[in-house]
Image (cartoon, coloured by chain):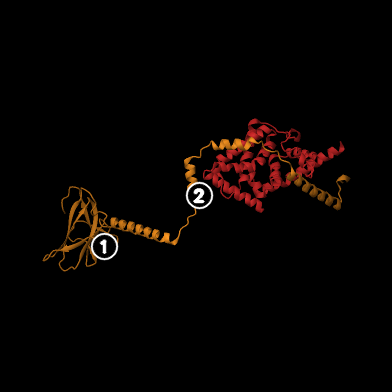
Amino acid sequence: MEKRDPKQQTRPEASAEVRANACGNDERIKSMIREMPDLDPPGQLLSSVMEAVRAKKVPLWLRAYRWVTSPRSVTFTPLQVIPAMALLLILVMSAFYVYERDTRNVALNRPSRELVPVVFTLNMPQAHSVQVIGSFNNWVPQPCELHKDNGSTRWILTLQLQPGRYEYAFVVDGTPMPDPHAEFYQDDGFGNKNTVLSLEKTDDAI
Amino acid sequence: MSSFDRNVETEDAEVIAAIWDGDVNAYSILVSRYQKPVFNLMFRMTGSYEDATDLAQETFIKAYDQLHRFQKGKKFFPWLYTIGMNHAKNFLRQRNRTHCVSIDDCEMGSGLDYPGQQEDNICSKLDYELLHTALDQLPLDYREALVLRYHEELSMEDVAFALKLKLSAAKMRVHRGLARLREILEKGQNGKERS
């Protein structure tokens, strides 16, 4: 049978007393640490640090980064906001208009010395309106209306196009149809046919 | 967190914002506020007044250089303490020195001879000498965890941040550090009584 050291046999009340003493000592140690006197730093520490720091130049990129990442507060009155918003609206609408106009006339009226005149004609006297749509005007018929001279049965329109490959179709009274006199056609993927037009630099009027 | 701590935290953030805006002199507020704990950390680490002065100075300069890495919303002092700890560890690694801090090493007027405070303090000079000796026997992380928690009165979260520990690890170090410190002090007390 294992013998235990009588000194190690502690009564419950004795162990509680030990714990209480330990707790008391811990509180006393915490208090000692809290009250532990500090050394005073040397008087020149502050000045020597600041001297070294002042000699340093903050890089421009860092200052710029700090400036752009620092939140700013802006104050304004409604009276200032209204004209600003109106101006902003005008600018946005102008930009939108210019963008629309440019994209609509993709290949039309571009300043170029190599424009090739192309004459679109369609013999359809019974039609009330004829337009041409194609990849050169982003498939928008508005600026490309064919006209018919008095007494003539042919609808006609001349466009200046840059050399390249285009697809187009006529829109007769709102209904698209390919050029009946063309040589090449291309399926548009929706069951219709577009006319294929290929312009070379040296081509004369077509 | 006390309102005092919150005020200090807010002030620190404002000072840092001013420094970021180019006001270099604002840094003196942070140096003045934290030079004592940083210097005392360095003195505990090196045991040398001169080395502690140099290391404290270098720590503040290093912190200034790295201020752009300081994350907004964090507390400055634990961040500074981390830089100081790492700097002191590197220094000791290079010098491969052991340190021995004794209260008798302190110069007159350095603060530890606190003549006017003797009557006010709960513990006697002898107790503090024992405490310093006992603290020096603790592993570095345990000692600094106790100092940060009870002397600098940081929260456990800030102690963990300063020592780059998880919260549970920081709590463990404070708990075990205190137990170990008690053992050392009790042994020292018993030895004194026997002699």
Q: In which quarter of the image is the C terminus of chain A?
A: bottom left
Q: Which chain is red?
A: B
Name the residue: 39% across, 60% down.
Answer: A83
The numbered dot on residue A192 is 1
Q: The orange chain is which one?
A: A
Q: Nearer the viewer, residue A154 or A145?
A: A145
Q: Is residue A175 above or below residue A94?
A: below
**Do the CB atoms of the residues marked 2 and 1 lie less than 8 Å apart?**
no
Residue type for callout 2:
Ser
Nearest to the observer: residue B117 or residue A199:
B117
* Disc 1 residue type (three-letter): Asn
Q: How far apart are marks 2 and 1 (CA)?
A: 59 Å
Residue at the spot of label 2: A70
Is residue A21 visible in the rendered image? The answer is yes
Residue A154 location, x and y as percent?
A: 14, 63
Disc count in the image?
A: 2
- Tell us which disc is closer to us: 2 or 1: 2
